[in-house]
Image (cartoon, rainbow, N blue to C red):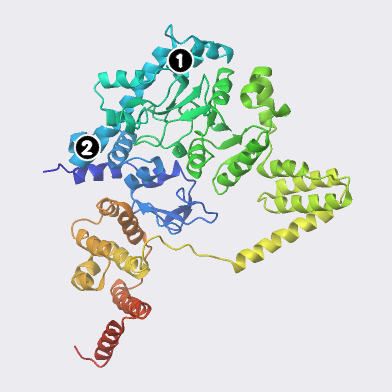
Amino acid sequence: MAKQIPDQLVQDIIAANDIVSLVGQYVPLRRSGSSYVGLCPFHKEKTPSFHVTPDRQLYYCFGCGAGGNSIKFVENIEHLDFVEAVRFLADRAGIRIDTQSFSEADQKRYEQRQRYLQMNKDAARFYRDCLFSADAKTAQEYVRKRGLGGETVKTYGIGYAPDEWDVLTKHLLSAGYAREELVQAGLSSFTKTGKVIDRFRDRLMFPIIDVRGNVIGFGGRILGEGNVKYLNSPETPVFNKGQNLFSLQLAKRSKELILVEGYMDVISLYQAGIQNAVASLGTALTAEQARLAAKYAEKVTICYDTDGAGVKAAMRAIEVFEGIDVRLRVLSLPEGKDPDEFIKANSAVKFSELLQKADTPAAFRIRQLRKQYTITDEAQRIEYVEACTKVISAVGSSVEREVLRQRLAEETGIGSSAIEAEVEKKRNRKKKSAQWNVKTPGPKVPAAIRSHTADKIISLCLKDKTVYQKYKEELSDVLEAPVHKKILELLAETDDAAQITARFENEESAIAAAALSMPVNYEKNDAAMRELMEALRKESYNQKVKEAIESGDISMLNSLLMKKNVKEKGGC
């Protein structure tokens, strides 16, 4: 029989991690009545729909439907499984736990993840040792030419994958790992004939380390001939390149991050004393990476290459950061240099000086627009001003708008008042458009399940145990959604909302959190419950009629109408 995690342990861990304090480390929250609200960390939004309820220790987003207790929040925000989330919160609260308490399935997942992490650690050590071997002259010469010192190599765990077919594979097989494990970990791959060979060969190796110090993957820079300059680990049970940032484990100590494109950009800056740079992992910046950066930093400066591809990537990164609470700046280095080239040709002091003068996103966009127009030509000057006022009108800060308006007026010779009028016209147009295009994001679960009336019934039962006891038998017939029915049963055992939510998984956890978080405040709870039950019966009836009509089920429709007529006439 599988061992289950004790309910008391779950309850103790949840109780020791106040959800407002926990969520507040990731999301800026402001008080609103009896709850706290903020921008949802799980989807992009401009108007806060993410609510945290302190008295019930739950969170719920009315925009995307994400919800649950503190354990579920950590699972989602840190991309951990249940066991890891429990351990994370236990460590945060200083509670010692025994993983033998977990179910066999959870224990197996935890042990499997630890095995993959150990495998990556063993591979990193192997690559490191290979870099200092007599057969790694090419790699050693490359390290020397790139100006990497011994301490830097050690700090980043830089290594070398030998130019052989299966040297790492043989090493790890001899250490007791299975062929299938090596392939799943992204360290080896199968050939067409079924042979297992190394994924990385003749490459300088950069271990990718998460914020907890685990080696989760690798990036390899080719040293010989080949089409793929940089090769990263594939998606594995412990690595998702869109959810991590290179060198964040070192840069997280700073409240300001510099976002660059490549591993060598990060490493060169670090060696020069600028130790708060990070890079995305061989992919365009993702929303998850942006939120991860904002979790640790108050300010992020994008410093990409200044070629066409780099500017395009910076523009996209600006869009990704929209709606995320972080001060964003964009630095364009002179002479088309990337950070690695610039720091070697100049100094850390010069780089830091430029960093202080980095553009706001709007100023950066205007700088790029300027390259597209010849403003000595009257028609192009007008087009340029039109394009710039569109950018300025989207800026939230009135001070920044004024600075940009004045700068544009000086640059073009067009009066500041005319530019201001154009900006305000565009802002007013946007406001009117927003009023006519208000959209209420719907939940991701079926409407029949996500009845707010049912949520209110559940929340009222939690709030008033007398009402719950009086109507629970009747409610077992009125409530239709399995989640609501199960909550009704669990309320007989406990009135701890967070503990109840812990009994659900995946979407059901969010549905439970929504119901248990629903604000209810009635003068007479008993009368309110009767009205809510009647309203839910009507909702259920109308939904069934709608489904019968849409499906063309005449028999079902007639049956529903007949039952309604009998009820209205007082029949049974």
Q: Is residue 26 visible?
A: yes
Q: Residue at x 70, y 29 (%)?
A: 336
Q: What residue type is labelled 2?
A: Gln
Q: Name the residue under label 1.
A: 154
* The C terminus lies in quadrant: bottom left
Element type where label 2 sits in the image: helix
The disc at residue 560 is none
Q: In this view, does 189 lie above or below 495?
A: above
Q: Quadrant of the N terminus?
A: top left
All told, the count of numbered labels is: 2
Q: In this view, does 242 lie above or below 486?
A: above
Q: Name the residue furthest bottom.
A: 569
Residue that lies at the very extreme toward the front in this rendered image = 193
- Counting from the top left corner in percent of width and height, residue 120 is at 35, 25
Q: Percent position (x, y) of residue 320?
A: 56, 45
User: Looking at the picture, how far across and down is residue 372, in whole percent?
Assistant: 77, 44
The front one of 23 and 258 is 258
Which residue is disc 2 drawn over?
Answer: 107
From this view, report whether residue 187 is shown above or below residue 28.
above
545 relative to 156 in the view: left or right: left
Tag 1–tag 2 contact (CB < 8 Å): no
Dot 1 falls on a residue whose secondary structure is helix
Mark 2 neighbour density, 10 Å: few (under 14) some (14–19) many (20 or more): some
- Label whose residue precedes the other's in the sequence (1 or 2): 2
Q: Viewed as shown, does residue 207 lie left or right of 223?
A: left
- CA distance separating discs 1 and 2: 34 Å
- Camera-side residue: 135 or 26? 135
Left or right: residue 567 versus residue 542 is left
Say which amino acid is labelled 1. Answer: Lys
What residue occupies the far top of the structure in this picture? 134
The structure residue drawn at horizontal position 20% and vertical position 42%, both measured from the top left corner, is: 5
